[in-house]
């Protein structure tokens, strides 16, 4: 009997709009304006972001190719987060009422980059949002009319390290 080869070491990756310190603080303030029910799990301030694409577990040996292959032309834009919602699955989000076309274009270009790298993007429609909490059914929404204007000057490839409890930005694309 032969020993099976060990599974390649992998990295759990996603592409995201990654906030700077000022935007992260503004997101924290918005998160704290909600009323959370017992058992809700607000997202840690250091983890607040807007996912563009989830890549899942990827072999670390592919990281260099992914880092280079995910570079896409980028034009800065403004993102207005003006809608607080509680989705049916207990996810509390902050979202744009009107996603800017430059965000949708970036998402589409990154979809093509993923396909070019042999990866399968998620099939569901893109719903841009920042997750504020999970298990939040019954949460009280913050007061209406609060707006967060986020100047987007790039995106990032990020590794999620569930055991280590954090995210690591592997590369920022500007």
Image (spheres, helix red, strand yellow):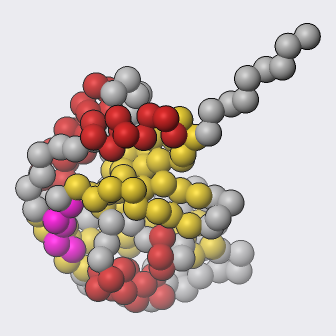
Q: Is residue 18 magenta?
A: no
Residue 73 picture location, percent across and down: 12, 46
Residue drawn 25% across and 79% down?
Answer: 148
In screen coordinates, is 109 left or right of 56?
left
Residue drawn 16% across and 65% down?
Answer: 153
Q: Is residue 153 magenta?
A: yes
Quadrant of image for the C terminus? bottom left
Q: Residue furthest top?
A: 1
Residue 140 picture location, percent across and down: 52, 81
Number of numbered tags placed on the structure image = 0
Q: Is residue 158 above or below residue 36?
A: above
Q: Main secondary structure of the magenta part?
A: strand
Quadrant of image for the N terminus? top right
Judging depth in this view, the residue of 147 and 110 nearest the camera is: 110
Determine if residue 164 is in view.
Answer: yes
Q: Residue furthest right?
A: 1
In screen coordinates, is 146 left or right of 93?
left
Q: Is residue 132 above or below residue 159?
A: below
Residue drawn 45% across and 88% down?
Answer: 33
Determine if residue 124 is in view.
Answer: no
Residue 98, image quadrant: bottom left
Residue 13 picture location, percent across and down: 47, 47
Task: Give the residues drawn in magenta, as a range.
Answer: 150-154
């Amino acid at each position: 009997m032969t020993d099976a080869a060990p599974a390649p070491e992998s990295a759990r990756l996603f592409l995201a709009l990654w906030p700077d310190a000022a935007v992260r603080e503004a997101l924290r303030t918005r998160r704290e304006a909600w009323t959370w029910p017992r058992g809700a799990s607000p997202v840690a301030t250091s983890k607040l972001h807007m996912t563009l694409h989830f890549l899942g577990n990827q072999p670390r040996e592919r990281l260099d190719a992914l880092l280079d292959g995910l570079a896409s032309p980028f034009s800065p834009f403004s993102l207005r987060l003006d809608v607080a919602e509680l989705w049916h699955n207990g996810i509390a989000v902050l979202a744009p009422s009107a996603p800017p076309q430059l965000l949708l274009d970036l998402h589409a270009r990154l979809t093509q980059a993923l396909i070019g790298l042999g990866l399968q993007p998620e099939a569901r429609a893109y719903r841009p949002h920042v997750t504020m909490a999970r298990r939040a059914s019954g949460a009280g929404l913050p007061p209406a009319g609060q707006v967060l204007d986020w100047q987007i000057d790039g995106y990032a490839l990020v590794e999620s390290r569930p055991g280590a409890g954090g995210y690591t930005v592997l590369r920022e694309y500007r």
